[in-house]
Image (cartoon, grey):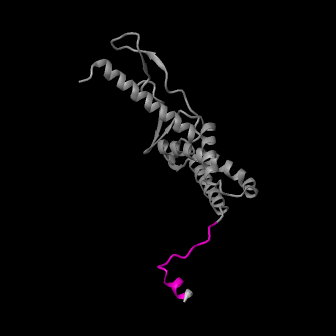
Amino acid sequence: MPTDGAQENKKLFLKIFFYFYYFIFNILWGYTPRIVVFWRPSTGPGGGSRSIRGPDIGAPTQKEGGDRVICDEFTKEERITKENRRLNIIFRQIPKKEKSAIEGLIKRAAYMRVSLEDMELDLDENGFTEPFTQSTNTPPYDRQRPIAQLYNTMNKNYQAIMKQLSDSVPKEPATERGDGFDKFIRER
């Protein structure tokens, strides 16, 4: 049975291992790395030893919207940059001549997607309608919130941009798949 010191060392090793791979994964996928690993004085026995800040202390705050969770760790600009990189990776097989023509579409699509995610959180939290009244004498009625209209319009435009981007990808010629009978007949 390991001693308390051995268990602490094992936990420390696992935390370092986890945070190392988290950091490497973020670099490889183009995320802006944050300093999530740092040393703090330990409160356990041993007094002056060091340990890694774990997820229970100082974990990034998160916004919850419906069944989705978006992390506050990244600013809107960082999320747009991340989405821009993702789209550039998806559309990297487009020839350079055409790529310069659709570069603006990729930037707009990245901005729109991040904005739509933010709007979705607001709509999940506050709903699509709100009570509205013209005066104090009339009873309130539900009307569509302005952000819901903006969301619908932006979502339609985003879908159109993504269709335009996907249409610009060169199509591979369809190959006939068969059991080889047609080829056998043609060769005879």
Residue at 61% in and 53% down: 90
Instruction: Decide if residue 47 is in sight here.
Output: yes
Q: Does the magenta stretch include residue 140?
A: no
Closer to the camera in the image, 121 or 12: 12
**Placement of 153 over or under 32, stated as above or below:** below
Q: In which quarter of the image is residue 166?
A: bottom right
Residue 42, how many percent across, how many down?
40, 15
Closer to the camera in the image, 162 or 91: 91
Q: Is residue 179 magenta?
A: yes
Residue at 39% in and 24% down: 12
Residue 158, how many percent across, how many down?
62, 54
Magenta-highlighted stretch: main secondary structure? loop
**Placement of 29 over or under 183, stated as above or below:** above
In the rendered image, the residue lying farthest to the bottom is 188
**Placement of 166 over or under 82, stated as above or below:** below
Instruction: Decide if residue 55 is in sight here.
Output: no
Q: Give the extent of the magenta segment.
A: 171-185
In the rendered image, the residue lying farthest to the top is 47
Residue at 47% in and 79% down: 179
Residue 88, how many percent across, how many down?
64, 50
In the rendered image, the residue lying farthest to the left is 1
Quadrant position of the N terminus in the picture: top left
Quadrant position of the C terminus in the picture: bottom right
Residue 46, how many percent across, how many down?
35, 11
Total labels drawn: 0
In the displayed structure, does residue 94 sit left or right of residue 34?
Answer: right
Closer to the camera in the image, 29 or 142: 29
